[in-house]
Amino acid sequence: MGTIASSGSTVITANYGRFRRRIAMGIVALVLLVVGGIVGVNRLLDDAPAAPDDVVAVPEAQLPDLGDAVPVLASLSSDAPAPDPAALSEQLTPLLEVPGLGTGVSAEVVDVATGDVLLDADAADPATPASTAKLLTAAAVLVTLDPAERFETTVVAGSTPGEVVLVGGGDLTLSRTAPSQTYPGAPTVDDLAAQVVAAMPAGTPVTRVVVDSSLFSGPLTASGWGPADAPSSYAAPVTATAVDGARVAPGSTARSGQPGLDAGSALADALGVPGATVVLGQAPAGAEVLGSVLSAPVARQVEQALSMSDNMLAEALARHVAIARGLPATFDGGAQAVIDAVAEAGVDTSGVTLADGSGLSREDRIPAGVLTAVVQGAADGSLGGASLMLSGLPVAGYDGTLADRGDDDPATAPGAIRAKTGTLLGVHALAGTVVTTDGRLLAFAVVADGSSDEAAAENALDDFASELAACGCR
């Protein structure tokens, strides 16, 4: 390394000298060009015929007064009137008592600017959060990891000729297609395979692919998951190596029961050896790296996990929080890491119990007040870098899991309500932000974990959020 550095310094010095001489010559040439141009223009003016006496003078152009520019993206007015708690409670409380929500409904509404609680309906009571638990995971990720951080997937040489090892780095978005059909910005297996082919001696056949998922440990499913949850259309066994979010095929809704082996098979296909043996194992210590790819930034993965309520991304992200905090990369370690990170960021986590990072577990408990505290902290900037999570919240009537949950009322048009959904059998939740008709930003959460009518419960939650957006309540 010393010889390379010394040689490099000599070359840099020589190049720098030549660079300075070239700059000086360039400046001289530019000056001559400018001077020559001025002289040429003056000669043209001297030789030009005089203007006739009957030339009509043209008045100078008058530009219209456009006034001050109005910002396209303006911040909310700090003077927007805040709802009166009594008026707001009178308007919203009946919506929490509709039969579709069942028993055990809890809710909270907070003024983001002041932190004032405008509505408290058993907001301190722990409740089954379903996927609104991803709000805590997202916040924990953003206050723990660099939002620009990327997760690396590598291929290293195996212990025998013709063997390569796919080492999972906890990026489940690695794509079998270019581009990914599900995760914009995801790395591709083809890119990884091309690097491997270039790094291996020409003509070396790959006969065996080993998949190393040792970055994550512990059970593949969480306590509180049902036997039909993994694999299903929404979850799979959680491993550090997967392709397309552990889907059985690119763009499919069905998830796989063997994500690691699927990833190994995808690499074998990309290497042109679909018949190669694919097994689970570990990479040899100090093995030569043959190729590597990087995931999309953490911030984008957080957005994707929230917008489409992607359980697999949420679980992987929780494991990375655990690793960063020195805890085991397991379901229990990830859950504890999420709680600790959010608590250290300033949120009172009293009543919070987690068994996973996605909210799929029936054992998860989060009070509605904690959900609003996380949203409020992200919205007012007090929760570290968690503000980035707001861009991942689905917009009612527009995208994500709220794409088909909105109405045509201009007062509650797309953009007024941004919220994370939560749905399990008998559980329906909604938590996020609302801009009222007066332009006031509110954080809210509603959790109903005793519902028996899915359609009625969703309609009731949507009515609550829409009424909140339309409510002047003064």
Image (spheres, rainbow, N blue to C red):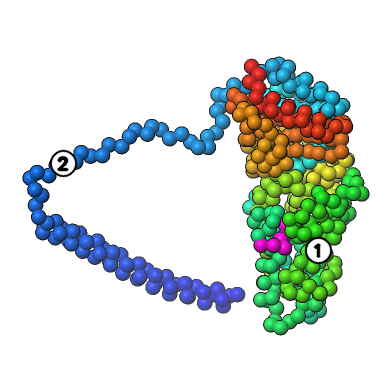
Q: For the residues carrying marks 2 and 1, which lies nearer the camera in this image?
A: 2
Which disc is residue 67 wearing? none
SS type, badge 2: loop
Query: How many marks are shown on the rendered structure?
Result: 2
The answer to whether residue 293 shows anywhere in this view is yes
Magenta segment includes 333: no
The answer to whether residue 114 shows anywhere in this view is no
Q: Amino acid at mark 2?
A: Ala
Place of residue 110 in the rendered image (x, y in percent of width and height, measured from the top left): 69, 27
What type of secondary structure mainly makes up the magenta span? loop
Viewport quadrant of the C terminus: top right
Magenta segment includes 175: yes
Left of 290 or right of it: where is 336? Answer: right
The image quadrant of residue 165 is bottom right
Report the Cα–Cα distance between label 2 and label 1.
80 Å
Q: Please name whichever residue, 235 or 11, is drawn nearer the observer in this view of the structure.
A: 235
Q: Which residues are magenta?
A: 173-178
SS type, badge 1: helix
Q: Residue at x 73, y 31 (%)?
A: 462
Residue annotated with mark 1: 262
Q: Residue at x 59, y 27 (%)?
A: 439
